[in-house]
Amino acid sequence: MPKPQENQILDALPSLERDRLFPHLKLVPLPLGMVLYESGAALRHVYFPTNSIVSLLYVMQDGASAEIAVVGNEGVIGVSLFMGGETTPSRAIVQSAGHAYRLTGNRLKQEFVRHGQMLHVLLRYTQSLITQMSQTAVCNRHHTLDQQLCRWLLLSLDRLSSNQLNMTQELIANMLGVRREGVTDAAGKLQRLGVIRYSRGKITVLDRPQLERLSCECYAVVKRESDRLNAPHRLSH
Amino acid sequence: MATASQDHGGNLLLAGLSAADRGRLIRDDPPIDLRLHQILSEPGEKVRQVFFPIDSCISLIAPGGGRELLEIGLVGQEGMVGVPLLLDVNLSPLRALVQGAGRAWRVDAAVFARAIQTPSLRVALNRYLYVFLAQLTHTAPCARYHQVESRLARWLLMTRDRAHSDRFRITHEFLAYMLGVRRVGVTAAASALQRRKLIRYSRGDVSVLDVDGLEAAACACYELDKKIYSRILTRKVSKNG
């Protein structure tokens, strides 16, 4: 059973706040494709993933959707809550099955009022989310599908702390907002280069340095920012 | 507090604050003048100041490596530049570039950090954060899916709102940067809007001729931005302002 500390935000809390909050956490399984909330829906809970990945998708009027950020064990789903927003502007859908710890929105709001470490960590996490969303926009506009796939794989792997992903090409295509054939081509190229192995919906990274070299700068920008934002409270305990 | 509103008006976020909270941010200094193309912050640099535009307009630009970049936000009198400080972070990942010269209130980072310890001020600015984040949510999909012509129309409307004028100056080259497209793409889109008599555009001078028509030509993101803003912030502003 995953521990709360497997999520970096929960892990960053001082013991006083852990003692206060952890009894209220509920471990929930997140099966692939589960929708945690729809855009515009009320935010009743926030989720701290341990070994799952959740995609935040923007759904357009014509029903097309595009991923704007991925959240895993480095983050939390539902940051709008501390800003006083009761609804969320995006859809949150499970992209890689696993678990998350869930907390009620009310409990979290009580915690914010105390102005403790939780608020501080969430503020900083929001900054790294802003960076990820901005970089996704740049990437969408300027970079090739090959580069985008590399960025996406790296971001996802970082959030699982793993070198393996269970992922269909269909799902990747949905996340990147491209046709499935495009993903098949791009993944095929990476496979021929010996960078990944792809079989029966399982992607294994064989050569991580090469994957980073093939990605556009967007991955490095996001990585640098989230490392930097995580660093101080890592050191503080 | 009519005097305080007059003294510190011009920026809607500030106007929506109580006089006491506004006083925590704005002291005796007058607003400053921002020059066209002045850079307020570069990616990775320390954020030293927060700006509340009055009649100036600032582009927030994300780096993509080399010449590849994209405007991800446009801030005028409705907002503020310096969101990282609101998040207890003192480095900005974005470039803030003055795109419309004009005045702004400038607040020193240390003063700002002290001021937002006040819960009422923190709550008010957090609402702006929500708007900023909600608008950022559709930036990536807009850049991917929407036609250059619709994005250009949206951009012209946003600039018009912030410039408070139907006329402003902007070069094709700059537009190409902001929209992340090639110059020829901007030229074609601008010509199309001109043929439909929605704008006049010559030698860098833009005149908006038909606002309703331009709104119809813009992608849905323009309407959406305004809706999010008024849902979260306008109510507050009208109550206190």
Image: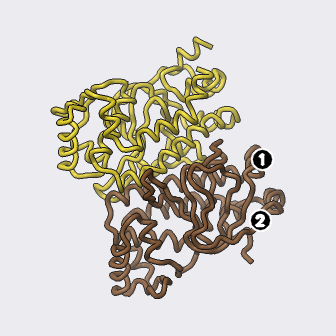
Residue type at mark 2? Lys
Chain identifier matching the brown colour in the rendered picture: A
Label for residue A110?
Answer: 1
Residue plotted at (61% across, 26% down):
B17
SS label for mark 2: strand
Q: Which picture quadrant has residue B206? A: top left
Whether residue A114 sits left or right of residue A84 in the image: it is right
Q: Earlier in the sequence, mark 1 or mark 2?
A: 2
Residue at coordinates 53% horizontally, 59% vertically from top-left? Answer: A56
The count of marks equals 2
Quarter of the image with the N terminus of chain A is: bottom right
Q: Which residue is mark 2?
A: A26
**Marks 1 and 2, how far apart at CA:** 17 Å
Name which residue type carries label 1.
Gln
Dot 1 surroundings within 10 Å: few (below 14), some, or many (20 or more)? Answer: few
Residue B234 location in percent, x, y? Answer: 55, 29
Occupied quadrant, residue A176:
bottom left
Residues tagged by mark 1 and mark 2 found on one chain of the structure: yes
Q: Is residue A191 placed above or below B65 in the rendered structure?
A: below
Q: Nearer the viewer, residue A88 or B90?
A: A88
**Percent from the top left, x then y, of residue B177?**
28, 47
Residue B175 position by quadrant: top left
From this view, report whether residue A111 is shown above or below residue B39: below
Between B89 and B127, which is closer to the camera in this rendering? B127
Q: Residue furthest front?
A: A62
Looking at the image, can residue A22 be seen? Answer: yes
Q: Colour of chain B?
A: yellow
Residue name at image x 36 percent, y 36 percent: B98
Residue A235 appears anywhere in the view: no
